[in-house]
Amino acid sequence: MTKHVLADIAKWRERSGPSGIPSICSAHPVVLEAAMRSVLPSALPLLVEATCNQVNQEGGYTGMTPDDFRAFVERIAAEVGFPLDRLVLGGDHLGPNPWKALPASEAMDKAEAMIRAYVAAGFTKLHLDCSMGCAGEPVALGDEETAARAARLAVAAEASVREGQSPPVYIVGTEVPVPGGAMSELDELEVTQAQAASKTYEVTRSAFLSAGQSDAFERVIGIVVQPGVEFGNHNVVDYDHARTDELRASLKEMPGLVFECHSTDYQTRDNLKQLVQDGFAILKVGPGLTFRLREALYGLDEIASRLFPGKRAETLKETMERLMLAAPQHWEKYYPGSAEEQALQRHFSYSDRIRYYWPQAEAARAVDELMGIFDGVEIPETLIGQYLGARYEEVRAGELKAEARSLVLAAVSDMVQDYISGCE
C-alpha cells in the first residue's frame, strides 16, 4: 500500500528539498486556483483542508459535503493542469463542534458520520479535535475526555478505509482558537508549555491504544500547539523564536511528530521560514488568502468606478455591506465596538469574516459583474498604482498582465509564495 506523502514529514529537515508544507484552508475557487498555480513549479504537494463547519455531511456553510468538496477541488485542478497525485485533502477540527449545542452522545454520533464521510471521499489528513464541550458540559474538556473522543473518531475513520485506499494520517491536539478564528484583540499569546504538549501526546497515545488503534497512532504525524502566533482584527502577533525553546525541545520526546501551527496568516516570510526550521512544519493559512483576494477585488471595484462610472447599479463593496448587514451571524460576535468600528471591520479586518459571504449567489454575481466589466480591458498602470499598489512593479516590469483576472490571482499567489519559500 502506498505510503502517505506526509508520513515521514518529521524527517524532511534531514534531507534536501522542502522542510515543511503550507496547508491551504479555503473553499474559494480563486484562492485554490492561485495556490495550484503557485505550488505547481515547486517540489511540494498541495495540501488543501476543509473545516468541520465549512464542509460536512450536512453541507456546512459552503453547502458542500466531503464528496462535493473533493469534486470541486478536482475540477479546478483539471482546469489548471495540477496533477491529482500531488493533491492531498485534509479535514480540520474534525469533531463535534458543528453540533456542540446538542448532547454529547448526539454530537459525537454526527462527528462519527462526518469523519466517515471525509474518509470515504478520499481525505487522508485528519485533524481530530474533540476538545469542545457539548450541551451541559464545560466549554473546554479535559485532556483524557478529549483524547478518548478523538480515539473514538479514529476508530470510525479506520473502519471507513476501503480496500486499496491509503489509510489516513492524523493530527491531534487543539492549542488554537475555536474554528473560525480569535474573538478578541490580541497583544501577546501564551506559548504552549512543553509539558502540556507532552501530556497531550501521552494521553492521546494511551487512548488510541485502549481503543485498539495502535496502527492508527503510528500514523499520527503532528500535534497542534500554540507557538505564539495569531492575528486579531487589526493586529498580528509575530513569531518569537526565543519564546519557544522549551516547546521545541519537547519534540524529541515525540518521535515521528512535527508541530502543526494554526493561524499563521500574515506572518512574514522570514517568520514562516523560522517556524519551519523550528519544527512547526505544517503551516495553516486561510483568512489571509481571502483577505488578499478581497483587497484585489476592492481595488478593481474602485478602478471600475473611475473607468466606468454609473455602469453598475451598486459597487461590489456596497453589495457586500448589504449582504453582511442582512445576515450578521458570521461577524457580529467577532467585531466589537461602535457602529463605525464594526463597519470598518466588516470589510478590512484581518479576521476576514467577509469570507463567509463570497459563496452567496448574490455576492458571486456581483464579482462576475465586476470582472465582466474588465473583459478585454488593459487597466492603466496609474490606476493599478493607485488602487492595487502591490502589483504595480510587476506590471511595470512586464511580469504581470494589466488585466483584472491576472491581478487578482497574483494578489493571492503572492502570499502563497511566502509559504512556499518559507517551507523550502
Image (cartoon, helix red, strand yellow):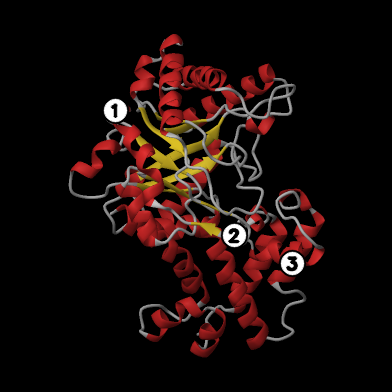
Disc on the earlier residue, 3 or 2: 3
With respect to residue 86, does 205 lie above or below? above
Amino acid beneath label 3: Thr
Mark 2 and mark 3 in contact (Cβ < 8 Å)?
Answer: no
Point out which mark residue 350 bears.
2
x then y, percent, for residue 317:
70, 70
Distance in Å between CA atoms under marks 3 and 2: 20 Å
Q: Residues within 10 Å of mark 3 (few under 14, many from 20)?
A: some
Q: Is residue 252 visible in the rendered structure shown here?
A: yes
Q: Residues within 10 Å of mark 2 (few under 14, many from 20)?
A: many
x then y, percent, for residue 46:
37, 48
Amino acid beneath label 1: Pro
With respect to residue 207, does 363 lie above or below? below
- On screen, residue 135 versus residue 3, left or right, reads right
Label 1: which secondary element: loop
Point out which mark residue 319 bears.
3
Disc on the earlier residue, 1 or 2: 1
**Residue at numbered disc 1:** 255
- Count the numbered circles shown: 3
Give the residue displayed 64% in from the left and 54% down from the top: 185
Distance in Å between CA atoms under marks 1 and 2: 35 Å
Amino acid beneath label 2: Tyr
Give the residue displayed 28% in from the left and 54% down from the top: 424
Give the residue displayed 51% in from the left and 21% down from the top: 147
With respect to residue 56, does 287 lie above or below? below
